[in-house]
Image: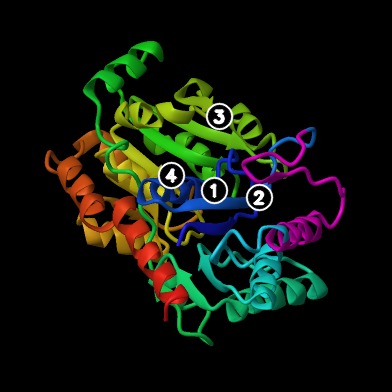
Amino acid sequence: MATVFITCPYPLSRLTGIGRFVRDLIRFLEPLGISASLACPAEFKSQSIRGDGGFNLRWKVFSNLELAIATAMKQVRERDDFQVVHVHQAHLQSLAATLTARILGKASLITVHVRTPVAAGRIRRATERLISNLSVRSATESVAVSRFVAETFPYREIRIIENGVDTEMFRSSAEGRRRVRTDLGLGPETVFVFAGRWTTTKGVDTLIRAANSSLLASLAFKILLLGEATPDEPDLVARSVEMLDNPSRIIPLGPIGGGLPDYLSAGEVFVSPSLYEGMPLAFLEAMATGLPVLASDIPIHRELVNRAGVGWLFPPGNAEELAARMAQVIKKGVPMDWSERARSMVVAHHDVRSKVAEYVSLYRSMIHP
């Protein structure tokens, strides 16, 4: 086997867990002698179809349909060059790719990262549910990134390959911590770190509201916001911060690219206030860097905190309970052995190299059953 045809419904430069995992998958397949042909949207509308597989989507409406058609056409053009199709997320692009694979006589694999809440509106809800179900049913093999995600597709047996992160890249850096804290003018205060898309589904608004709680009024802390705004909520952080009594406690930094391990090292605690997740990479990256996580009490967060034996949970969307946990951390500090225990869990269960090896084994079994 030499080539895998990989699809992703989002631009790889966009800050999404799916895109980041696809980038890592491709990066770690190459040393094993396996190349990838990628089909995904381009980041900017001005781009043409690029060598990395980015499609310039021109339709103002039905862009997902355009992406699905472009992906299927690329599969047909390259049908002699790849042996297996690997699609990510239950999406119209994935459905088109798996159906095209069947027509071409190729094996296909879908990895479902999360089953998002169904959109409002009866017709849209029914359409999204149909596409999601058919995407999983039409693939030769189906994988979910966690037991929780697999259970949302009860009609088909789905194997589990949990997400992994690069534990060599994500590790604590004393020098990185010193540099970042100096550059940001941070003193002895407790630093909480958030990394991800700035959306209500990721809970960034809950975190900002918590910073304004009377429970934290007399305590010294800062919150670093790493990530990026989204087209549907472009002003969420700016509007939320404007309402704070002390906006200087929030430091919005935006996307910081390859410097993420250093910025994580600069904190004491990672905050993950999401309303839903499948197997959150940001959570795993933080723990690999030695940060215990203060997380919303959703199934996958609870499972990871229990697996590591470190961390704190609070009710999803509850800013006052989040503030209470933050106050506890500031007053009592983080237990000395929690950093080592957090990293040890990720190294043992979530190193990306072992996950890529599982996928390679699955590819080979699909081609040579």
Q: Is residue 133 above or below residue 120?
A: below
Marks 2 and 1 in Cβ contact (< 8 Å): yes
Q: Residue 315, position in %: x, y?
A: 42, 58
> Reading the chain from its start, which is encountered first: label 4 or label 1?
1
Magenta segment: 47-76
Q: Residue at x 33, y 24 (%)?
A: 220
Nearer to me, 41 or 339:
41
Q: Which residue is mark 1?
A: 19
Q: Which residue is mark 4?
A: 27
Instruction: Answer above or below: position of 208 versus 253.
Output: below
Point out the tag, 1 or 3, that comes first from the N-terminus.
1
Going by the image, does 155 lie left or right of 45?
left
The first of marks 2 and 1 along the sequence is: 1
Q: CA distance from mark 2 to mark 1?
A: 9 Å
Q: Residue at x 36, y 46 (%)?
A: 31
Find out whether the residues at labels 1 and 3 contact each other: C-beta distance under 8 Å.
no
Dot 4 or dot 2: first in sequence order is 4
3 or 2: tag closer to the N-terminus: 2
Q: Does the magenta portion include 67?
A: yes
Q: Secondary structure at mark 2?
A: strand
Q: Quadrant of residue 52?
A: top right
Gap in Å between the C-alphas at discs 4 and 3? 42 Å
Cβ atoms at labels 4 and 3 below 8 Å apart: no
